[in-house]
Amino acid sequence: MGLQVPKRSGALRRSLRVALLGVTMLVLAGCSEADTRQIRNLAMPDRATEQGPYTYELWKWAWVAAMITGVIVWGLIAYVVVKFRRRSDDEVPRQTRYNLPLEVFYTIAPVLMCIVFFFHTVRVQDVMTELEDTPDLTVEVVGYQWQWGFNHGIGEQNPDAFGDDGDFAYEEYVYTTGDASEIPTLVLPVDQRIQFNLHSPDVIHNFGVPSFLTRMDVIPGRVNKLQVTPTVEGTYAGKCYELCGVYHSRMLFQVEIVSQAEYEAYLAELAEAGQTSEEPLLGGANATTQTGLGESQSQEGSEE
């Protein structure tokens, strides 16, 4: 005689259903507008650049593929549970050692899924890392322990400039940097293709803005380049995504997407404040004080 399994009473099953329904309603009722937006975006931020939807579409269809896979697996589990359930205490189920068609299916299907994912991932990666020969403007970005500096060019741009060793896109720059008491703001014009030349004088950092749906490493000794086209005016958060030392959490910045007129007015404000330089401030020997500035010029609180 087989093992006797005690049956649950009808009252217990009804109680479990009511409890599950109550918990579900409580969770849904507690969703704020931000939570609802997160659910709608599948936990992704709103897209603020021309390139952002490509990353979002890849993320969305990955969820769809995962759900289809889950439904198939859950359906097979439910089918097996019902189809091959024990109907009698004395019944011994038919023993199946292998099923060749099923084994072929669950070997080939994951391989095909990986190939499809790989193809679309490479396609999106190519879009996100594409560098046009003539961006509308170039910003020299420096990440250093533990803040950010942003150098905006003034005048005509040389799109062929490499962005290092004196070969820069502009003959004059205005800059802004953060310090221990205030995070910097990166102001950018809307609907312009912007190239970021990323520099680091010390350790590896990572330049990222969640609403851009892209980010890139900032590596000492090389200039990584990233291009985006902001399409939505507003204020967005940015930060370093690479653990870069004890004060990594300080490496925050804000991004303001504004009109072209407001952007030009902002550059004029920086120039009027005296924050000008013939070359972008990229750190180096003075990286422990403030990016590119000498000890006497560093802002209070910027020295670590």
Image (cartoon, rainbow, N blue to C red):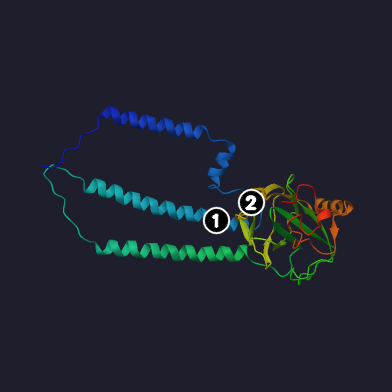
Q: Quadrant of the N terminus?
A: top left
Which x, y percent locates residue 106? Answer: 33, 61
Query: How far apart are the alpha carbons under marks 1 and 2?
Result: 31 Å
Residue 212 spot, x, y in % from top left: 64, 54
Badge 2 amino acid: His
- How many residues crowd mark 1 within 10 Å: few (<14), some (14–19), many (20+)? few
Q: Position of residue 126 (x, y in %)?
A: 59, 66
Q: Nearer the viewer, mark 1 or mark 2?
A: 2
Looking at the image, which is closer to me, 184 or 47? 184
Q: Which mark is residue 229?
A: none
Which residue occupies 84% across, 52% down?
270
For disc 2, the marked residue is 248
Left of 85 or right of it: where is 114?
right
Q: Secondary structure at mark 2?
A: helix
SS category of the residue bearing label 1: helix
Please state the horizontal and vertical placement of residue 175, each as a whole percent of the image. 80, 56
Task: Say left or right for 10 vs 152.
Answer: left
Residue type, mark 1 in image: Glu
Where is residue 277, by image quadrant?
Answer: bottom right
The quadrant where residue 173 appears: bottom right
- Residue with the most extreme bottom position: 160
Residue that mark 1 sits on: 57
